[in-house]
Image (spheres, helix red, strand yellow):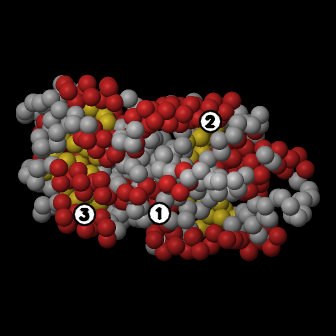
Amino acid sequence: MTFSDLGLSPKVLSAVTDAGYTQPTPIQAGAIPHALLGKDILGIAQTGTGKTASFVLPMLTRLEKGRARARMPRTLILEPTRELAAQVEENFIRYGKNHKLNIALLIGGVSFDEQDKKLERGADVLIATPGRLLDHRERGKLLLNGVEILVIDEADRMLDMGFIPDIERICEMIPFTRQTLFFSATMPPEITKLTEKFLHAPVRVEVSKAASAATNIIQRLVKSGAKPWDKRETLRNLIKAEDADLKNAIIFCNRKVEVSELFRSLLKHDFDAGALHGDMDQRARMQMLANFRDGKLRYLVASDVAARGLDIPDVSHVFNYDVPIHAEDYVHRIGRTGRAGRSGKSFTITTRSDTKYVDAIERLIGTKIEWHDGDLSTVTESEGEEAPRRGRGAPRRAGRKDEDRKDRGERSKKDRHSKRDETPETVSDEQPVAEVADIAERRARKDAIRSENERKGPSNRHEQRGDARPQRDRPGRHRQEEDDATVGFGDDMPAFMRIVAKV
Ligand code: AMP
């Protein structure tokens, strides 16, 4: 089958040819003909399967008829994260190069004014994260009753981030006569319920078993002692051993604090590394990603914010520095490699206490993952145990002199903080310049938000935190980390804390 068999317009076909694609992927072949007929689609597909083009191409063809009106977008695409929204915009620009379409991107972390202007001009394509979209609507700058096509992408990720109530609200604002294209990598019951409520006789297109891992990825477990310096050493040795095949790698950690620690450690050991997590300023995130994509950085240490959906076509390796606690995250993480039919390798550093998580992953993917170099039975008892936090009463560790000292040096100040303090805000002289600048920028941004909130009063508070909605609206299934998660009480200080104590 070729693209010209699908019913796409000549303008779209020409852009697809220019992009160098000859054959539609299974999700494209399955979804595009139905989408062109105006049918609702339920697409069950992971990222990396060509799913973005499966909705962008038919939308472009259908948008050739008609014009946009001020503040009334013709189509709406909802994405869970800003990076994904920006990526979809890139797809519209690439495949829409023969069209004169107005595209508006509504994401948090950037000013409202530019976005307002684009809405005012009339958007053919509106790409948005749910929170920012609702903010614009509440400000009266946006009318959703002209939307003809609604795309809900990465629905299971929306669920994880607690966006489902927002999605329901938005669906209710759009005329029932719209066409809805709905995509999710997995179909948990909450998502099934949503599709039953908002899709009309959808055509179901499933390109691989839900939550299955791609077969062109070599997956290995790598035994390690549980102590952070053991894990870091295991990782460094792995990277060195893979050097000949390793073009670039994403290294996943479970928590932001580990992203920061590992990033600093890799820099100290002269690895060409960058970091990506949800606390970073939007511009810094985009810049970091662009550097990685362009090959200016070889290693990207990332939290799960980066795990889903990001299209970095040519990643040769994924390292799981931590075994993900939620098995589905494993599938998304390793899905960053082996994209668009290429082969890839993933290594998961595993300690004794990780075995229950590995079991859950193996149950989910329906296969055993091979050990790279022997299983955990060869890890000695003391290595297998989690190290006591260094502090009062804890014995100091002997041996591994220089290597350990390097790692100890970088940890010493932070270890005085609680392990739960995931967002270090103190600038220490041990931190690299980029990270210090990042922390300083975040601090400045928080200060600006605080004074802006004071100026504005209680309304519109969540808009200032990028796209994050107030926590009480977000009954997310789990949140290892969330984009722009509120720190502490955020702006919502309980009344009892405002009472002045009499002393
Ligand atoms: P997605 O699943 O949308 O994130 O797409 C994953 C990657 O596949 C992107 O780099 C696309 O540019 C690429 N891609 C999309 N469609 C095709 C196709 N028909 N043939 C080859 N690569 C494709």
Whether residue 441 is situated above or below residue 477 in the rendered picture: above
Inter-mark Cα distance, 1 to 3: 18 Å
Residue 159 left/right relative to 375: left
Q: Residue at x 39, y 34 (%)?
A: 456
Give how far across and how far down residue 24 sits, in percent. Answer: 26, 47
Q: Residues within 10 Å of mark 2 (few under 14, many from 20)?
A: many
Marks 2, 3: nearer the viewer: 2
Name the secondary structure under disc 2.
helix
Q: Which residue is drawn at 79% across and 61% down?
A: 389
Q: Name the residue under label 2.
A: 439
Q: Mark 1 points at which residue?
A: 478
Query: Which is nearer the eye, 422 or 332?
Result: 422
Give how far across and how far down residue 142 sits, in percent. Answer: 20, 37
Q: Which residue is drawn at 34% across and 45% down?
A: 131
Q: Mark 3 points at which residue?
A: 194
Q: Which residue is drawn at 74% across and 48% down?
A: 414
Residue 264 left/right relative to 41: right
Q: Quadrant of residue 192?
A: bottom left
Whether residue 75 is situated above or below residue 356 in the rendered picture: above
